[in-house]
Image (cartoon, rainbow, N blue to C red):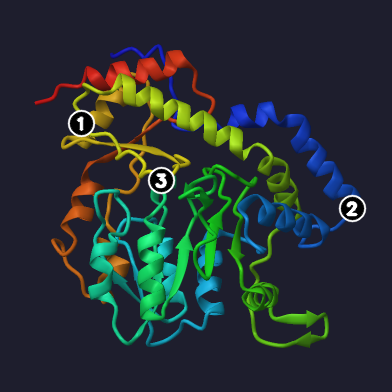
Amino acid sequence: MASEPSVRVPIVDLRARAREERAELLACVERVLDDGGYVLGPEVARFERAAAEAIGAPHVVGLNSGTDALMLALWGLGVGRGDEVVTTPVSFVATVAAIAHVGARAVLVDVGPDQNLDPGRVEAAITERTRAIVPVHWAGRPADLGALGEIARRRGVALVEDAAQGIGASHQGRSVGTFGAAAAFSAHPLKLLPALGDGGFLATGDADLAQRVRLYRNHGLEDRDTCAIFGVNSRLDALHAAVLAMRLDNVAGVVAARRRNVARYRELLADAPVALPPEDRSGDASAWTFFNVRAARRDALREHLAARGVETLVYYGTALHLHPAAKALGYARGDFPVAERQCAEVLALPVHEHLDEAQIAYVAEQVRAFPAG
């Protein structure tokens, strides 16, 4: 029987973060308990103000998930049945699901060398039915917002950023989430700004859009006895908001640690049998929600690392157009070859802020030891 590996390097370490922040987390719980308000209320308002200031967006609306943030951004901009939304085939399924839930059709465009939506292919995908372009800051790496924003302005469509993985990233010195009509952020526990469960928020410079989303997230209620529109329940809980406001102060440190870890990986894996993620464009800075290498024998590499105590994840192994749920979009295997190859080869290595130098060196050593043939 094979012995258990002596070294364990987790892909994330949520327990370590909880231990570090235990006193602050308990203070958040006590404050919410003492206040007695568990849904929306002053904690959510406080987080929204702090997040708006941190991102540089005039308005932030707290919601129950990043998925709802994207869906309500599209809904609030009037995207609906019969409309088209251009986006990437490389993302979590929620990107296309949000488009489907407002009644629109996702029009997919292949990714480029930066592994994000390719601006050079977007123009040809725009039709008279196109209402929005949704770039995804995949892995916390900024999409080319300058080029995509120029296309959106010229063609008269909205730019809506899927920034679910993008908190802490910047494009040309400016925070992602501030370039389009709206942006959707996730606060899922695996994100860089995590709640204690599901959570998310929308950022926008449009006061009317922000107000529509605030109304819609709470059943469309203007007050307890007046329903202006039939909305949904997408409220951010007070406890999550309190934790997010506390953790917002630490995001810069989390991102800085991950950038240091990525820089060290680049040094140690320069001669490894894997392809490293592209370097940032000049003026951009990735947040590194995860750190994907690429290997033609990805599954074998993952097994090799698992046997040596290195935990990995695949983000994401199936391009969006190849999921059964996307069959109605009418795409087939081979339609987006760059995305399909990317999904077949990517493997996320541990990059979280709790790694020490010895762990990074160990992971790199095990990757280099993987047979190239």
Q: Report if the CB atoms under discs 1 and 3 are less than 8 Å apart.
A: no
**From this viewpoint, is residue 352 visible?**
no
Residue 139 circle label: 3
Of the residues shown, which amino acid type is indicated by label 3?
Answer: Ala
From the viewer's perspective, tell me whether residue 147 is left or right of residue 223. Answer: left
Location of the N terminus by quadrant is: top left
From the viewer's perspective, tell me whether residue 331 is left or right of residue 359. Answer: left
Q: Quickly name the residue at label 2.
A: 35
Q: CA distance from mark 1 to mark 3?
A: 22 Å
- Dot 1 surroundings within 10 Å: few (below 14), some, or many (20 or more)? few
Location of the C terminus by quadrant is: top left
Q: Position of residue 239 (x, y in %)?
A: 75, 50
> In the image, what residue occupies the spot 36% across and 41% down?
280
Q: Quickly name the residue at label 1.
A: 300
Relative to 224, say whether 287 is above or below. above
Q: Position of residue 86 (x, y in %)?
A: 34, 71
